[in-house]
Image (spheres, helix red, strand yellow):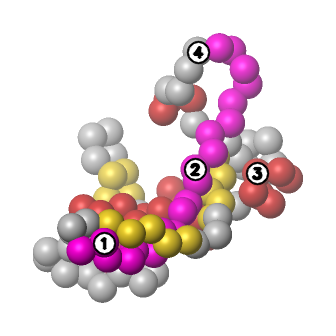
């Protein structure tokens, strides 16, 4: 059993060094890569990509896996001055660690 690797979570061409993480847009399923992708589209693509690897099944079967992403039922809300209908597609990120009562710290995962 082992912790998920950078390439398993973020795609085959993901790399890192001491100060940067590089994720190849072509590795993010569903994203149309361009020089002007929005921050929200990039975050959505990263979350969708990570969700394919960080599943509850893997979390349940391997104590080295500390994070899993799960989707919930889509629903709808009305927003804006025109009360336009929007679809919500929730993803929940769950962070697990031994309970040392230290709060959420990214270095723990």
Residue 92 picture location, percent across and down: 58, 54
Question: Label 3 vs label 4: CA separation?
Answer: 21 Å
Q: Is residue 84 magenta?
A: yes
Q: Residue furthest front?
A: 82
Label 3: element kind = helix
How crowded is the residue under tag 1: few (<14 C-alpha within 10 Å), some, or many (20+)? few
77 vs 82, left or right, is right
Residue at numbered disc 3: 59
Residue 17 picture location, percent across and down: 33, 46
Q: Is residue 48 magenta?
A: no
Do the residues bearing badges 2 and 3 touch, measured as CB atoms within 8 Å? no
Among numbered discs 3 and 4, the one appearing first in the sequence: 3
In this picture, is 94 found above or below 84?
above
Label 2: element kind = strand
Among numbered discs 1 and 2, the one appearing first in the sequence: 1
Residue at numbered disc 4: 102
Q: Residue furthest left?
A: 35
Residue 108 picture location, percent across and down: 57, 29
In this picture, which residue range is highlighted in magenta? Answer: 82-101
Residue 36 picture location, percent across and down: 14, 74
Question: Label 1 vs label 2: CA separation?
Answer: 29 Å
How crowded is the residue under tag 3: few (<14 C-alpha within 10 Å), some, or many (20+)? some
Question: Label 2 vs label 3: CA separation?
Answer: 12 Å
80 vs 97, left or right, is left
Question: Label 4 vs label 2: CA separation?
Answer: 19 Å
Where residue 50 sits, quadrant-wise, is: bottom right
Q: Residue at x 69, y 30 (%)?
A: 97
Between 104 and 15, the one lying in front of the other is: 104
Residue at numbered disc 2: 93
- Marking on residue 83: 1
């Amino acid at each position: 059993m082992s912790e998920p690797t950078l390439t398993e979570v973020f795609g085959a061409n993901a790399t890192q060094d001491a100060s940067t993480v590089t994720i190849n847009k072509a590795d993010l399923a569903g994203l149309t890569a361009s020089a002007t992708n929005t921050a929200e589209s990039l975050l959505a693509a990263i979350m969708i990509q990570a969700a394919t690897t960080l599943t509850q099944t893997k979390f349940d079967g391997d104590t080295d896996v500390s994070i899993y992403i799960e989707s919930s039922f889509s629903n709808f809300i009305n927003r804006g001055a025109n009360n336009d209908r929007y679809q919500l597609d929730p993803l929940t990120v769950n962070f697990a660690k031994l309970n040392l009562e230290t709060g959420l710290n990214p270095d723990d995962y």
